[in-house]
Image (cartoon, rainbow, N blue to C red):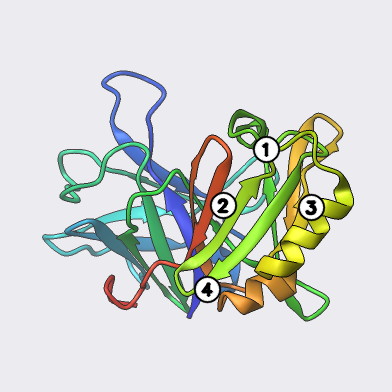
Amino acid sequence: MEMGVFRVSTTRQPPYRPKIKTSSPLLAGAGFVNGAAVRAVPCEYGFTLTLQTDNSITENGKLIRVGLDSNKNPTITVNLANNFSTTGLIAGDFLAAGYEYGVIKAKKLPEAQKYCVVGPQNYGAYLQFCGEWLSSAGFMPDTITTVSVSDDGITFSVWKDAAAKYGEIVKYAREHKYQLIQAKRNQRLTTMDVPGYVLGKAGFGKGDIAGILYEYGTIKLFKPDLRILGF
């Protein structure tokens, strides 16, 4: 099973209702190609999508079709309307999405500001934080960040002593077994790369779902327990 992440948004026109729209590259590999019939069945805090060979539906589901986005990629839209009630889902929620051929299972993830999927790079794991949220959280370009790994994830902390010399920061990091990284400016976006060896120390591998919690000066990366969600 390959894993992805959905996020609940809202329809553009009133009455505004929650919806989920995805153009994940995993869709085609799971058989969800343009025009395919899909049976959507809701459950508490989630739903299941199953490829159909005909247009029949069951009483507790509805039929939707795979479409194409502006880049001609397969896309699926699930409107969480009155005839498709998924208890507990609201706009802004994140869901783990498990892809197998012909079936996609989605369940709500624990609360977090962001979720992402760890990607591959040179046969290892790789993750890049990207967006203005980094600057809003105090991780400005060229800011030195200490990185600590524990049993429950990875913590990124902005180095707050502007008067400290770089050699002093390196000595501190070595004494506490921290890594040092910096945020960068990539064109108009702030980015911060999380190396594969740091991810590996915390048990993250390529394809894993990672949750992000942050406040000013600190980012916490954690791995949700997908077994609790039924994966």
Q: Amino acid at mark 4?
A: Ala
Q: Amino acid at mark 3?
A: Ile
The residues tagged by marks 3 and 2 sit, at their Cα atoms, a distance apart of: 43 Å
Is residue 167 among the parts visible in the rendering?
Answer: yes
Q: Secondary structure at mark 3?
A: helix
Q: Residue at x 41, y 23 (%)?
A: 12
The residue that mark 1 highlights is 160
Precedes in sequence: disc 4 or disc 2: 2
Rendered image: mark on residue 23: 2
- Which of labels 4 and 3 is toward the front? 3
Residue 138: horizontal and vertical position, in percent?
A: 64, 33
Q: Earlier in the sequence, mark 4 or mark 3?
A: 4
Which residue bears the numbered disc 3?
A: 169
Residue tagged 4: 30
Which residue is pictured at 83% across the width and 76% down the height? 122
> What x and y, as percent, mark residue 96?
40, 62
Task: Provide the secondary structure element on which disc 2 rests.
Answer: loop
